[in-house]
Image (cartoon, helix red, strand yellow):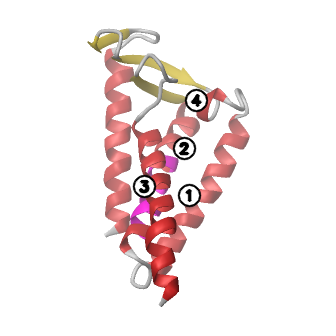
Amino acid sequence: MYHVIIILLIAIDQTLKNLISSTMKLGETIPLIDEVVHITYIRNSGGAFSILQGQTAVLILIPAVLTAAIIVYISIKRKKAAVPYLLALSLIAAGGVGNLIDRVRFGEVVDFIDFRFFPIFNFADICVCCGCGLLLFYMVFYDRRSNRN
């Protein structure tokens, strides 16, 4: 089940990125709600918030190792670990692989979601952030409760 979720999220991410990069010019912006949310096509050669600009090898190696480890871990623990925990890891892995595909193909990541008050990001970034949020929620509320028993 978790591998299917990962594959589905990667497919959504790559479909959106291909749609944006094939129909828009680099730097082009389309307002959805003017001055609130736009679709803006950019490419980011750095990590989150453009850190490690131009460090493509590092930005490929570290996520490749981490996402591979997460996927192996999910495969091993899929019947024993809690669903929210494995779902969180699946979201993180999907986002990591989605951006990793871009880095290997282009040397940079396609970003397009633009809230004007925040750096431009993509669907894979949303997966990673939601996965981290769910993981934090799980660790704070669920994991503590199960450790009390």
Q: Residues within 10 Å of mark 3 (few under 14, many from 20)?
A: many
| SS for dot 3 | helix
Residue receiving disc 1: 67
Above or below, 57 relative to 51: below
Q: Position of residue 44 (x, y in %)?
A: 57, 25
Q: Position of residue 124 (x, y in %)?
A: 44, 41
Q: Residue at x 40, y 9 (%)?
A: 28
Tell me if 84 is positioned left or right of 117 in this view: left
Separation of residues labelled 1 and 4 (CA atoms): 18 Å
Q: Which amino acid is tagged 2?
A: Leu
Q: Earlier in the sequence, mark 2 or mark 3?
A: 3
Q: Which amino acid is tagged 4?
A: Glu
Q: Earlier in the sequence, mark 3 or mark 4?
A: 3
Asked if the residues shown at circle 2 and circle 1 are in contact, with their CB atoms under 8 angstroms apart, the answer is yes
Q: Which mark is residue 91?
A: 3
Q: Earlier in the sequence, mark 3 or mark 1?
A: 1
Q: Residues within 10 Å of mark 1 (few under 14, many from 20)?
A: many
Q: Which amino acid is tagged 1?
A: Thr
Separation of residues labelled 3 and 1 (CA atoms): 10 Å
Q: Residue at x 30, y 9 (%)?
A: 34
Separation of residues labelled 3 and 4 (CA atoms): 21 Å
Write the start and end of the magenta stretch as one range: 86-96
| SS for dot 1 | helix
| SS for dot 4 | loop
